Image (spheres, rainbow, N blue to C red):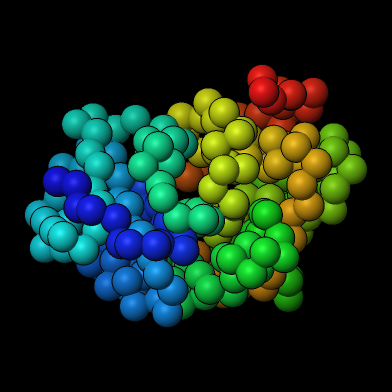
Amino acid sequence: MPASSPHGAELTVLVPALNEEATIRQVIERVLAVPLRIELIVIDDGSTDKTPAILREFEGRIFVLRNETPQGKGAAIRKGLEHATGRAVIIQDADLEYLPEEIPQVAGPILAGAEMVVYGTRFSKGMPAGMALPNKIVNVLLAWAVRLLYGRRLTDEATCYKAFETELLRRMELRCRRFEFCPEATAKAIRLHRRIAEVPISYTPRTTIEGKKIRWTDAPQAFWTLLRYRLWQPRS
């Protein structure tokens, strides 16, 4: 059920969602309250709970895309990107681990013309309380891998809050299907000779029981993706 995009949207917010009935309504309401000209695109990745019904409540205010069967977070982001009209794009998870109220501080430097890529770092003050130890270890190792393979220092490679100039993200010719979106976008941003700025954000981790889908076992794919695109070059 597509809705027309807001006229002159500054920022497109892409929200991949799979069975997030507990939080999706609040996420949408809080994103729409952000003091920017927002285009909100929710990609329902084959939800079988009440998520589709909740999305219908916002008809005319948001743009909804749907996959009949789950395709993965990366595939959902790629699908949403095809419809993005904002000058910048940011990814928002459908849970509330990240605060929508902090979207402006992540996307702001891009909208101001000061940056082309900005990540919201969860680790500016150390590891957040409540994050599982395996996830902490993987996040540290990913940061080291970026430094080793690309010579760039990042504190939080795997953060959800990644913002890009829209046309730059399209130049990356993304191929991700699942959670490898993060390392692919990181690798290609660096290969396109773009600085990745980081700004501090808040973070409240949720558990697998609460619906968290990414696992530490997804780490091998992330490391392989960083290595795979080490020598990537855009076609154009």
Residue 132 coordinates in the image, percent (x, y): 57, 58
Rendering coords of residue 25 (x, y %): 23, 67
| Identity of the residue drawn at 53% across and 73% down | 104
Q: In this view, does 159 lie above or below 72?
A: below
Residue at point 57%, 43% (across, down): 167
Locate residue 65 relative to residue 161 in the image: left or right: left
Q: Which residue is drawn at 32% across and 71% down?
A: 32
Q: Is residue 122 left or right of residue 114?
A: left
Q: Quadrant of the C terminus?
A: top right
Regarding residue 215, the answer to whether it shows in the image is yes
Decide which of 136, 92 is in the foreground and name it.
92
Any part of residue 134 in sight = no
Q: In which quarter of the image is residue 224?
A: top right
Across and down, in percent, residue 46 comes to 23, 37
Q: Where is residue 60, by image quadrant? A: bottom left
Residue at the front extreme, as displayed: 8
Expressed as whole percent of the image width and height from the top left, the position of residue 92 reads: 44, 58
Q: State the residue at coordinates (74%, 54%).
A: 196
Counting labels gives: 0
Horizontal side of residue 44 vs 131, given as left or right:
left
Residue 232 in which image quadrant: top right
